Image (cartoon, coloured by chain):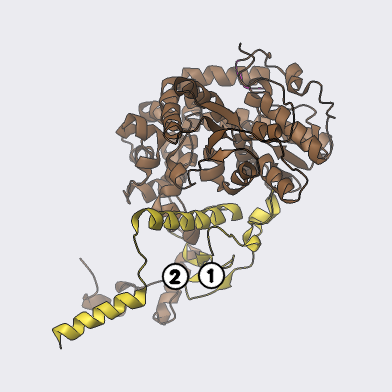
Amino acid sequence: MTQIDDPERADDALAVPFTPGMRDNPAQLAEHVETIARQPLPLADVTATPEQELAAEWRNAAYNCFSSGHKFCREVCPVTQVTRNESWTPTAFHANVVAMEQGQLSIEDVAADYVNCTQCGACELRCPNTLFTGDFYRFRTRTVDVVKAVRALAVDQGVHQEGWRTWNARTDQLTHEPVLGDTPVSQEHVRDWSAGLDLPVGGSTVLFVDCEAAFYRTSVPRAVAQVLQLAGVEFGLMDEQWCCGGPAAEMGYVDQARRFARHNLDSWRATGTTRVLVLDPHDYISFTEDYPRYFGEEYADIEVVLVVELFAELLREGRLTPSVPVERTITYHDPCRLNKRKGIWREPREVLRAIPGLTFHDVDRVTQWSYCSGGGGGLPIEKPELTERIAAGRVDKAAALGVDTLVSACPWSERPLAGAGEAVGIDVVDIHELLALSLGIDVGGTTNGGAP
Amino acid sequence: MSPEEHDPQDGGGRIGYRYAEQHDLPPAVPVTDVAVTTFEHVLEVDPRLMERWVQQQQMPAWDSLRIVHGRHDHLTWMHRHFADRVVAGSGLLHEVEDDDREVGP
């Protein structure tokens, strides 16, 4: 019931609806607002249960979803598309936080549900609370952060997913993710991919190579390094590169992620490095979102450059001129972490359009908000069958275009997509490999971990 | 601002991530009683109005601009997929006025 007609509150400016800050507001209202602003109320009891502590941090984000209920997130969510499981939707991930705050659920009840997310970012971008108001209020839907926070709470409370626990324990032991291939995963072999390329170590600019590319799809870093050499870009390899730590952060092993990040930053410092070239979108997320959060101003002198953006610039400047025709009919897979999470879609297309011989059937970037390889967020480790179904759906969309090749710009997407591509006769190629080919470079390396 | 031609001044013209560029935004200029602008054509609520119930998030420049560009991209995409024609607001007003004339006072 409204209080507008309450005669006892006739002099109370708060008794009538108002928009804060308007010039024609009653003068006494400004007094109220300032009083309130000077004495903010505590948002939650932070001495409560671990679940309620999490909710204290994420309750507004969770209620922003829970109270809206738009559910535009559902049809762009790769997991929802293939499972239709209501407990594995972005909406459920937020509703659970509300329930945990109210004491109706514990982390043990819901931890396993949060496995079912690739952290592709489609839901949070498509959510109207991001897309139409997020920049205005500087308050947007943050499903990826909520999922990461709940996973971290689970690990903190000793609720582990066995696949993730093993994966991260082995990563901790090896300093790299235990991707399977012919090259043994170890610090000793992290630069094996560069055999014969005569690359220096250290320097002001280094190339960071993710675990999948360094040990499994070595054709990608070999292509990148040789294209950079051809363009005359000076760079070295890291002195002692460890995993970026991003996958551990995604799976909830936050302390390990921070430890790995600290190691890498210290290694850059030791070699006077101020510019890091990144070929993998997942690393790009780590270095532009996680590391700034961990290190703040300490990170101020580090510049992070995505290689595909650099390649587009080198093409524009005429420092690269592809001349060898590549006779393939292709479509491009927008990697989630570039297109949805970073808004980077233009440069890969610039690169592809510079390659002679290609017949390019493009699918626009907005349609691809609902596409995913299923390879992110640790999903292939815990739910490989789900990753397979998501990848199969993505490759089917490519097949419908009548292409023979699906090009990606993300090494982590290329293994599941290649597996699905075999079934329908579609080759999966990395964009850096394709550009190198058109520049007449004999790339070398392997696209499948050295399997026959 | 066309989604195809993001203004270089809004961060779309220089590659690479640098911490300072992301966290030191252009100075906010008040445009109404309740809104300010930082990047050109990007309106934000006056942050003083979000100090109590819902506090603003740490949002680096790239994220604000990603949302703005994503919105333009999405609206263009919606028009391409679901709109056969674009109707000017003035045209709609004329239709309303014509209807009013037919009904009479």
Q: Is residue A395 left or right of residue A437?
A: left
- Residue A370 figure quarter: top left
Circle 1 crowding by C-alpha within 10 Å: few under 14, some 14–19, many from 20: some
From the image, which quarter does the N terminus of chain A lie in?
bottom left
Above or below, A261 relative to A63 = above
* SS at circle 2: helix
Above or below, A50 relative to A311 = above
Can I make out residue A134 in this image?
A: no
Gap between marks 1 and 2, in whole Å?
19 Å
Badge 1 and badge 2 in a common chain:
no
Toward the viewer: A22 or A45?
A: A22
A150 part of magenta stretch = no
* Kind of residue at disc 2: Val
Toward the viewer: A370 or A384?
A: A370
Magenta-colored span: A176-180
Q: Which residue matches tag 1?
A: B36
Toward the viewer: A96 or A415?
A: A415
Above or below, B86 relative to B33 = above
Q: Which residue matches tag 2?
A: A33
Circle 2 crowding by C-alpha within 10 Å: few under 14, some 14–19, many from 20: some
* SS at circle 1: strand
